[in-house]
Amino acid sequence: MSKNTGLNAIEMQYLRLSLGLTTEQVASITSTTHQDVLAWEAGETDTPVPVQKKLLDIDDIIEMQVLNTTDGIEELFKKEPKRRLAFVVYPTQAVYTQYNPEFLSTLPLTELYSTAAWRIKKECKLVLEVDVSLVALDAEAYKAYRADNGMSESRESRAKWAATQLV
Amino acid sequence: MSKNTGLNAIEMQYLRLSLGLTTEQVASITSTTHQDVLAWEAGETDTPVPVQKKLLDIDDIIEMQVLNTTDGIEELFKKEPKRRLAFVVYPTQAVYTQYNPEFLSTLPLTELYSTAAWRIKKECKLVLEVDVSLVALDAEAYKAYRADNGMSESRESRAKWAATQLV
């Protein structure tokens, strides 16, 4: 089961859990079947190397995202020393696809983006002592906010809306 | 929902997922009901502060365990420069309770111990370039191994058995 440096059944399971994914979601992003995923995690069959690589690559992408974003936030707070920040996440795949499409190729599911956001929150707390709150984008409320303030859709507008959600 | 610096619904969900727990397991270790957990994660009710604290404390304990174990492994490989290591995890709560009871007070579920093990594997790879394999304790095979080698039960015996499982 634990052949070479590949991932065995329990490692595949905890890699998946650490990414915040269900077995169905792993099947969907690796173009395999739910039965395949269950068989790997039960140790009945070895996980194909490309599947292992796909999930490990996603984990690496998330870690890179965490590092880059935490660096960005550290920069931000050099000029502007407030210690509270809102970070937009996307409550459904449809909202994620509409508003955050540039991430679809690297983090195909909104759950992966939320996992990255959670790790960013943890890292910011630990390293910068900055409180990051994850704010799920409420598409209707956000549209109304933009209309009220004459703002166009942009990452910055989303961040501004999210900041209004901190109480 | 995102009141003060407490955790909101989506943060509670991703904290749980990052710990590798189901909603049922969170209910069990926080002495709440499954319905409570579902209501927090749906944003229908706020998560009680003691529950938030309990889960955040567990996450801190895991991070401490990761740091300490990674330090220990770094020490080990100063003397003995092989780059492969087996780390025992426990496939069921019964096996965990029998063989690893000293962790029950801090990491009450075997899934939490496995989550710690997964993070240790990641950290060792990244920081030390050491390949750690998680090996689920097979109680029968381990007993046979001890009998064959005249060994008593101990953490060290388990580690030795686990090393035989690396191929």
Image (cartoon, coloured by chain):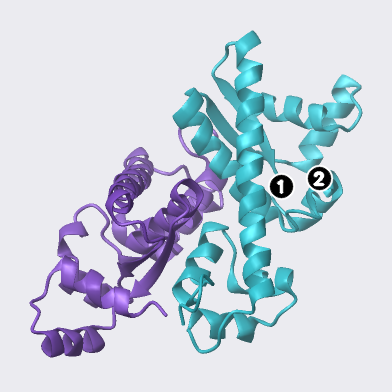
Chain colours: A cyan, B purple
Q: Chain of mark 2?
A: A
Q: Is residue B24 left or right of residue A97?
A: left
The one of B36 and B67 positioned closer to us in this rendering: B67
- Dot 1 or dot 2: first in sequence order is 1
Which quadrant, please, contains the C terminus of chain B?
Answer: bottom left
Give left or right: position of A159 versus B143.
right
Foreground label between 1 and 2: 2
Q: How far from the left and from the top, in percent, is residue B52?
A: 38, 42
Identify the residue under disc 1: A90
Disc 1 versus disc 2: distance between alpha carbons? 8 Å
Q: Nearer the viewer, residue A7 or B89?
A: A7
Q: Chain of mark 1?
A: A
Dot 1 and dot 2 residues touching (CB under 8 Å): yes
Q: What amino acid is labelled 1 in the image?
A: Tyr
- Structural crowding at the residue carrying mark 2, measured as other residues with C-alpha within 10 Å and reported as few (<14), some (14–19) or many (≥20): some
- Which residue carries the number 2 mark? A100
Q: Eyeballing the image, is B114 above or below A78?
A: below
Q: Which mark is residue A132?
A: none
Element assignment for label 2: loop
Nearer the observer, A23 or A161:
A23
For badge 2, the amino acid type reads: Asn
User: Where residue A128 sits in the image (x, y, percent)?
Assistant: 50, 24
Residue ID at (36%, 38%): B49
Q: Is residue B40 visible?
A: yes
Q: Do badges 1 and 2 share one subunit?
A: yes
Which residue lies at the image location 54% right of the left edge and 43% below the top edge? A119
On screen, residue B70 versus residue A44, left or right, reads left
Residue density around tag 1, few if under 14, some if 14–19, many if 20 or more, within 10 Å: many
